[in-house]
Amino acid sequence: MKRDFHAPGRSAVYATGGMAATSMPIATLTALDVLRAGGNALDAAIAAVAVLGVVEPQSTGVGGDCFCLYAPAGSGEVVALNGSGRAPAAATPEALRGRGVEALTPASPHSVTVPGAISAWALLNRTHGRKELAELLRPAIRCAEEGWPVHARVALDWANAAEKLRLNDASHRRFLPGGEAPAVGHRFVQPELGRTLRAVAEEGPRAFYEGQIAASMVSALRDAGGLHTEADFAAGLEVAEFVEPIRAPWRGMEVVQCPPNGVGLHVLQILGILEGFEPPDGGPLSPERLHRHVEAARLAYRDRDAFLADPLQADVPVARLTDPAYLAKLRGLIDDSRATPALPPAGTADHARHRDTVYLCVVDGEGNACSFINSLFESFGSGILAEGAGVMLQNRGYGFRLQEGHPNCIAPNKRPMHTIIPGMVVKNGQAIMPYGVMGGHFQPMGQTLFLSNHFEFGLDVQEAIDCPRLFPNPAKGVVELERGIPAAAVERLQQLGHRCEVIAKPHGGGQAIRIDHERGVLVAGSDPRKDGCALGF
């Protein structure tokens, strides 16, 4: 496709020496500064995500978790890291019910797992980085101590989260200056967070998981009724670990994902289901394409809700759920003439709301490629602020269930079902695209829409990100549409039996870098649904 330069939009970005794409301009610039100073793609990603944790505080931070896929140039491998934290040792359904908890809620201390991000950054840095962690944290420290202007999408999300922030006295004081969410352009300063980042820079990750900073986080959680202890946080120091990535062939390439407890396997499911169809002539916004994609996603999310959990504490049948024969049977359930009114039980093929995250990617001049995602889950996570440390605590534990016997039931030291997934595309043993689409539960849908837009329908990287999106929200039973979906397509989806609903905020936000090995060119895109950009040199 050729871009219509009469229409609003942006072009894909081209470069040769290095490229970064993030959801905030200052983070993208930080990544390029690290590359130009001799750091590799992983160094640049860590520096950028640390900045994002300061300037996009509703989405991410040191109080969150992270996952990473890293493809060292020339190695033919993709390294996967799980940096998700665990529930407290005392977290059992019985203990929670003893405190009158019948269901996990987003702003509850029981939805807070021990943050894994700092553990992850440190492990990645000492294993694959070139720069010292202290150097990589300097830009974030400066942004925290000197302040940074609030951007438009950040301001919108902040205002929407104001009621949650009012539930916690510390969050109300620090994140609602004058009692309201900061306006666009407000220079927001976070001295307490700056001190925490300085401590990690000077003393290493132990300064976060033990001592005064950990005590501040535990105190905030215990005051809110949580079960967390300083021992739980001390155990978080080593929570990050390298894991074996999962992958599947697709369209002559391989799509690589992190394994459970993340939802990457459902990307492989959706792609595998849809691969048996030829792309329809009507293009990426044709009713036929949208219907098939929605139906495939409904089947994959059905399996997610039944099986996805911490594989160290539950059996997650990844091989069975991604087996081509099983996916072919699921494909057979898709009827182009109607929406499936009732799905068969999870794991079979026989008839019988949005979150906040940051995703970024970096490729350096040597070809090292990094796909990196870091999240508090919902906007401002739990809304519980460890005020002395300046750490906003995630609510990843909201992904648990209290249903005993369910694979994803909360349990001591267990990881919850995780929605954040970095992606990587490999061809002929070489990484050709680190990519990701943030947006909580939307992410498998978002990734597969993007990949199909680019590789099947021929949209360039930026066009594939820009293309209007939809999502069959399993919690609501409706297909949530962005306003850009054509009216004729919406009408046809409704005729097929889909309940359609236009949403106020768009779905997620993506970044991608295509590595053109033949020409020695990098091509990147960054989502206009966020405040960021792609830049290269």
Image: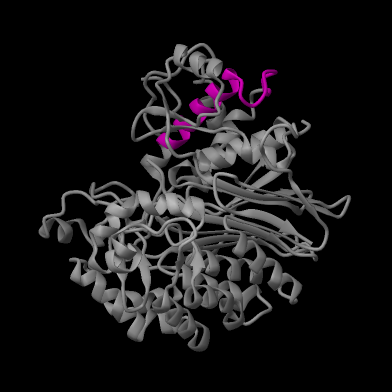
Residue occupying the far right of the picture: 519
Query: In this view of the protein, can residue 341 be seen by the observer?
Result: yes
Direction from residue 363 to residue 159 in the image, left or right: left
The residue drawn where x is 22% and y is 67% is 90
Quadrant position of the N terminus in the picture = top right
Kindly indicate the quadrant of the structure image that contains residue 6: top right
Q: How many marks?
A: 0
Quadrant position of the C terminus in the picture = bottom right
The residue drawn where x is 66% and y is 34% is 453
| Magenta extent | 278-302
Kindly indicate the quadrant of the structure image that contains residue 479: top left
Give coordinates of residue 374: x percent, y percent.
50, 60
173 in relation to 335, above or below: below
The residue drawn where x is 74% and y is 76% is 37
Is residue 279 part of the magenta span, yes or no?
yes
Kindly indicate the quadrant of the structure image that contains residue 535: bottom right
Query: In this view of the protein, can residue 378 be seen by the observer?
Result: no
Magenta stretch prevailing secondary structure: helix
- Depth check, front residue: 432 or 350: 432
Give coordinates of residue 484: x percent, y percent.
55, 29
Give coordinates of residue 389: x percent, y percent.
36, 78
Colour basis: one colour
The residue drawn where x is 23% and y is 59% is 167
